[in-house]
Image (spheres, grey):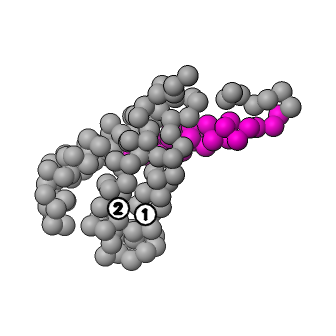
Amino acid sequence: MSDLSLTGVATAENRADIAAFILRTSTGLFFLIHGLIKVFIFTPAGTAGYFESIGLPGALGYLTILIEVLGGVALIAGVATRLVSLVMIPVLLGAAVFGHGGNGFTFSNQGGGWEYPVLWAVVMLALSFLGDGAWSLGRRK
């Protein structure tokens, strides 16, 4: 049962559904925004150029955009949440190492440290355990 009981006490399953919904939709929205910023602000070619400037293949920039946009939409909808969350982890750890690793720990450092992408990777790991949750298109009844 995914609704709160009449007594107002949430079950463990209900709390997990609420947690999955909050994590799915918020991180999905953030990924979608991140990907769309790369499309409309930095441009795909600019993103590929940035990846090349830090020693990565430019094609990885295009792949990252695709993963962030499609993965963000999938998370918001609650489709393949476990798989999408696991796919996001190497993207985030790559950002931590290659994009922010030289800037120190704190994300408030110039250029942003690696703290935030690593935290986001841990959140994705937790979400991979929670799965879609009750309020999702991927929910199996």
Q: Is residue 108 magenta?
A: no
In the image, which residues are magenta?
8-31
- Where does the N terminus fall, quadrant-wise? top right
Q: Is residue 20 magenta?
A: yes
- Residue 84 falls in which quadrant of the image? top left
Identify which residue, 40 or 29, lies in the foreground.
29
How far across and how far down the image is residue 29, in percent?
Answer: 45, 41
Asked whether residue 57 is in view, the answer is yes
Indicate left or right for 104 with 23 as reference: left
Chief secondary structure of the magenta portion: helix
Label 2 sits on what residue type?
A: Leu
- Residue 55 falls in which quadrant of the image? bottom left
- Where does the C terminus fall, quadrant-wise? top right
Label 1 sits on what residue type?
A: Val
How far across and how far down the image is residue 44, in percent?
Answer: 19, 46
Residue 73 sits above or below residue 94 on the image: above
Label 1 secondary element: helix
Cβ–Cβ below 8 Å for labels 2 and 1? Answer: yes
Q: Of label 2 and label 1, which has the lower sequence position?
A: 2
Indicate left or right for 131 with 111 as reference: right
Residue 91 sits above or below residue 53 on the image: above
Question: In the image, which disc is placed on residue 93?
Answer: 2
Asked whether residue 26 is in view, the answer is no
How far across and how far down the image is residue 131, in percent?
Answer: 50, 39
Indicate left or right for 98 with 81 as reference: left
Question: In the image, which disc is placed on residue 118?
Answer: 1
